[in-house]
Image: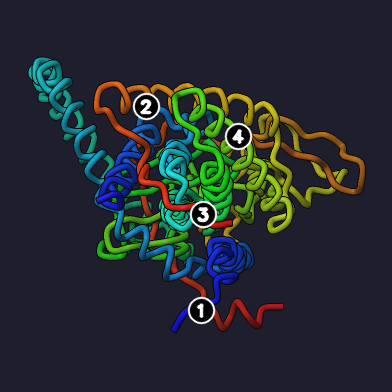
Amino acid sequence: MRWLRFAIGLLIALTLHSLLDSFYPNALAFFNPYIILVVYYSMGGNILGAIVAGVLAGFVQDAFSNAMFGLHAFSLTVCAYVVAYINARLSLRGTLAFGACLGGAVIVNELVIYILVNILVKQRIEMFEQALLVKTIFTLLFGMLVYQLLTLFLREEPIEATRRPAAW
Amino acid sequence: MAVPTDVIPRRPTLLFIVVLALLFFLMSVSSQTRYLGETRTMFERTVMTIFSPVPKFVNWIGSTVQDMRYGYLDMRRAVNENVELRRKVGSLTTENLKLRQSEGDLKRLRSLLAYAEQFDMQTSMAQTIMLDTAGRFKSIIIDQGSKEGVQVNDVVANANGLVGRVVLTTNDLAKVQLVTDSNCSIGSLVERTRRQGVVRGSGGSAVQMFDIPSLADVQPGDRVMTAGIDGIYPRGIPIGTVVRADPGQSLFKTVTVKPAVDLGTIEEVIVIHTRKIPPAVVRYAP
């Protein structure tokens, strides 16, 4: 069931990606719907599930962008792992906690992409700091709004809320 | 058999490391083969094929809503236009007859001068359904795929000029690398002076023209076209206009070119099914 919900979330993220691409071509520079899904899923604290979710969401994002195939999968997997690792140890709940995780994840995601592009393609991303700031703010605002809507109207807990024992 | 207790806890971390290693390998392969013709992995094609109904559906919804919105207004406008067009058809038919006569004359004169006519390449129309110009890697996705005869390295243009080239095809979609993509290189020439160079995307909104000597005559306002020397882009497609031509610090000028096409507003494009150079010829080229 939780994977079905993740699949629906992924389809919604891709639909949003397509819609933004069609009507506001530069919107994805300010906002990343995939990371919201991955962070929301990883908040459940299941590390294995989070890794798989990160890889799947990343592959879909890679397939519909012209980046090196695997770039977003790599960065989203790192984010998913970090968020799930933290949530396996600390029981973070609520919009602010989600916002903190999401903000951190966006920054980690952009930093990982920056480093990988530098290493593999040997190219410098221009205006990196400005883009990072704008993306963090917009993704954070939208992500927290989605989280509020899910918790208020659907009484939804993060996917995989049935936490598995953190065996570390 | 019981699994040793000290192994189980480390599994997620091990899996994480293995997954990252595999993804890094996948990226390395992808980044090394980006410049070649058959660049994309089967895996990428599979993922794109599985999810291709989503952007197609979104595009269908978008165009249906737009059709409904503009349908009524267009219908009223069409009635008025129809009257106007009927009038124009009369005058154009007369003009057409005159031009046909001129065309016959021109063909005869060309044959007299042994002028070799350029071969015609097949083209097809396609619609943009996704536009990714936000990041450093810039691409569009069009609604024509291998089923319609689109192949990797087919050239994509519109009425204003060059848009890019096809880098990946599925049955019913194709991914197009834009001229502004940081991995795009095009053999080009300055129309006024015929000076050849290489246009490369910079990841921004403009492109750079390289290999132009400091003493070469290139000025802002010069039009830049494809030179037809790179084995992909046919000759004579407008790329853009020179906006800056600085002396540069070395032997070459720094030339900035503004693309002829507004890449943020592409809707319909023409796919030119170019003649492909066999890989063996490319491999053994000097």
In which quadrant is the C terminus of chain A drawn? bottom right
Marks 1 & 4, CB-CB < 8 Å contact: no
Residue B278 image label? 1
Query: Around disc 3, counting alpha carbons within 10 Å, would you say few (fewer than 14), some (14 to 19), or many (20 or more)?
Result: many
Residue A104 image label? 4
Q: Name the residue located 62 percent from the left edge and 62 percent from the top edge.
A: B31
Amino acid carrying mark 2 in the image: Val
Residue B9: horizontal and vertical position, in percent? 55, 63
Amino acid carrying mark 3 in the image: Ala
In the image: residue B238, left or right of residue A16: right
Judging from the image, mark 4 belongs to the subunit labelled A
Q: Are marks 1 and 4 on the same chain?
A: no
Q: Which of marks 4 and 3 is in front?
A: 4
Residue A73 image label? 3
Whole-angstrom CA distance, mark 1 to mark 4, is: 48 Å
Image quarter for residue B34? bottom right
Judging from the image, mark 1 belongs to the subunit labelled B
Query: Around disc 1, counting alpha carbons within 10 Å, would you say few (fewer than 14), some (14 to 19), or many (20 or more)?
Result: few
Residue A9: horizontal and vertical position, in percent? 32, 42
- Provide the secondary structure element on which disc 1 rests: loop
Amino acid carrying mark 4 in the image: Gly
Q: Name the residue located 40 percent from the left edge and 36 percent from the top edge.
A: A21
**As drawn, A92 above or below B184:** above
N-terminal-most mark, 4 or 2:
4
Marks 2 & 1, CB-CB < 8 Å contact: no
**Residue marked by disc 2:** A146
